[in-house]
Amino acid sequence: MVLGAAQSAVLSFDVGGTDIKAGVVDASGTVLGMRRVPTPLDPARPGEAVLDRLAELKAELASEFPQAPAQAAGIIVPGIVDSAAGVGVYSANLGWRNFPFTAEAEKRLGIPVAFDHDVRSAAAVEHHFGASKEFSDVVVMVVGTGIAAAVFSGGKAVTAGGFAGELGHAQVPDPDAGPGSTGSTILEAVGSAGAIAKRYHRASGVSVDGARGVLLRAGEGDAIASRIWADALDALAFTICQCVNIIGTEAVVLGGGLAEAGDDLLEPLRKRVDRILDFQRRPQLIRAQLGQDAGLLGAALNARALLEGTP
């Protein structure tokens, strides 16, 4: 995907738990020099270590593309993010708490910085340019090792100081609690790709190649794999229906590794959602379209919006 034209080039940084993606988006909207480097992990100074690496990447990109001097940078990170305050509130995987990203990044990079959440920024690109652009009330759910989401109501992102969209920690019925039990667990413990593989291994003693391996075994008639896959679908459908009940969601966009299952995920999920709901909206369940670079594009759009003075 090539973004539309703008007045200036910007830097884009997508900081993940394992890798940082970086690039320059020039004024024509073309991404230049996209690269992936390991995310530095320093328990003593986690936020500072990341920003030190971003400063090095800025220098590398400036040297490589002198014809596209960046006037702003977009930085997105995982965890709980208060973008209005410019603070990384909490990241379990990368280790910071209440780190002032915007202020510290602007010191190191020497240009204005737009700081935001990774899933929310990727979801904004998906919402405005991809699968759900015709809808106003949307949940974009990324289902991978964990589960995170971004919520749009009336076409606008619901952020709540960075705490909105933590669907991975929403309560769902616990399939391991036994018949008739009212026990609950969190969605991420049942419906994520990581949980599907772990629960199968725990139940069968067999290691598989992630959730895809469980799905393949289910297709071959493995009863344990079929049960684990069905449990994940039940938990995801339960949470989707809760979103519909609370905020009137009209479309749910599914991304991340689990969405690569395509219709093996979407078709049974649609049937479950339809069975649970009554008079409520029937949300469209759509696979994400823009792939793994949506976050990098979202960070670039955030930086452009900062330069243009738009929210």
Image: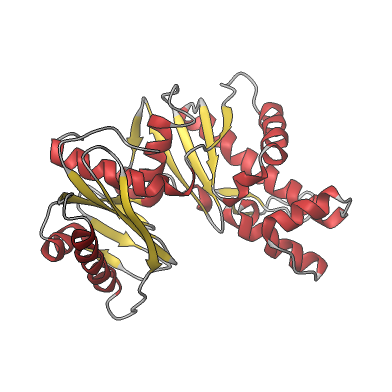
What color scheme is it? secondary structure
Report the residue at 40% width, 31% height from top.
Answer: 129
Q: Residue 287 at what x, y percent from top left? A: 57, 36
- Total numbered labels: 0
Q: Is residue 306 above or below residue 39?
A: above
Q: Is residue 282 above or below residue 103?
A: above
Q: Is residue 116 above or below residue 126?
A: below
Determine the residue located farthest toward the bottom in the rendered image.
44
Report the residue at 36% width, 25% height from top.
Answer: 154
- Look at the image and tell me whether residue 176 can be seen: no
Left or right: where does residue 177 sit relative to residue 20? right
Q: Quadrant of the N terminus?
A: top left
Task: From the viewer's side, name the closer residue of 179 and 115.
Answer: 115
Name the quadrant containing residue 62: bottom left
Q: Quadrant of the C terminus?
A: top left
Task: From the viewer's side, name the closer residue of 14 and 23.
Answer: 23
Determine the residue located farthest toward the top in the rendered image.
279
Task: From the viewer's side, name the closer residue of 161 and 151.
Answer: 151
Q: Residue 15 at what x, y percent from top left? A: 35, 60
Left or right: where does residue 143 sit relative to residue 225? left
Q: Residue 168 at what x, y percent from top left? A: 52, 51
Q: Residue 43 at what x, y percent from top left? A: 34, 79
- Look at the image and tell me whether residue 144 can be seen: yes
Left or right: where does residue 75 sit relative to residue 70? right
Q: Is residue 168 above or below residue 275?
A: below
